[in-house]
Amino acid sequence: MKIRIRNKDTLVVVDVQKDFCPGGALEVPQGDEIIPILNKYIEIFASHAAPIVVTRDWHPENHSSFKDYGGVWPRHCVRDTEGAAFHAGLNLPKDTIVVSKATEPEKDAYSGFDGTNLEKALKGQGITRIFVGGLATDYCVKATVLDALRLGFCTFVLLDAIKGVNIVADDSERAIIDMLEKGAIGITFQDL
Ligand code: VGL
Ligand code: ZN
């Protein structure tokens, strides 16, 4: 498949933060290995004046998803801490749009659309196609892709630029099948 990126397309890079990379508080195995290919996608989108969005998990210190507060996850991506920072290897253009999610103590949000202005921001610019990569395949990438489909975006999942946690083996495999079955189009860099 050859896809020509245009300025009404958007690249959405999900949660490529230190805490989700090896050595981080909630590490995705080999999570950092997708960074070079994400940078290649970023370059292509930037060269076509297509907007680039990065989401970030941006929790308060007492977030309800943390084990200490009744949740299932170790403390991670606490706002304004080192672990919540984007991985330094990610080459983000100056005009990158940053979307913070799960910012309230009581509510978790895996999807970049959940509780944010992302839908409005994209639809307001006439964006119809979005291309999603990042971390983690089986949580925030999947939730973001499924929301995008539900909201009517033509949604591509970047199969060579996602990585999963796999708390249960094959979770990522199942997440990919689920996204494709619901209408996402799976592509890799050579499709651009
Ligand atoms: C995520 C677990 C908890 C993710 C965020 O970005 O996939 N996973 N919070
Ligand atoms: Zn989180």
Image (cartoon, helix red, strand yellow):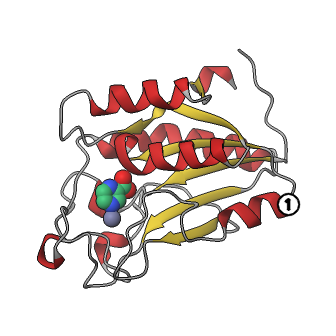
Q: Residue 109: horizontal and vertical position, in percent?
A: 43, 64
* Quarter of the picture holding the N terminus: top right
| Residue that mark 1 sits on | 125
**151 or 173, which is in the foreground?**
151
* Amino acid identity at mark 1: Gln
Q: Which residue is at a point 37% across and 81% down the rendered structure image?
A: 79
Q: Residues within 10 Å of mark 1 (few under 14, many from 20)?
A: few
Q: Which residue is at a point 42% across and 58% down the rendered structure image?
A: 110
Q: Residue 113: horizontal and vertical position, in percent?
A: 58, 60
Q: Report helix, strand or loop for mark 1.
A: loop
Lateral position of residue 157 relative to residue 56, left or right:
right
* Quarter of the picture holding the C terminus: top right
Asked if the beta carbon under badge 1 is closer than 8 A to the nearest atom of ligand 1, the reply is: no
Quick check: which quadrant has ligand 1? bottom left
Image quadrant where residue 93 sits: bottom right
Is 52 rendered above or below residue 2?
below
Q: Residue 177: horizontal and vertical position, in percent?
A: 44, 24
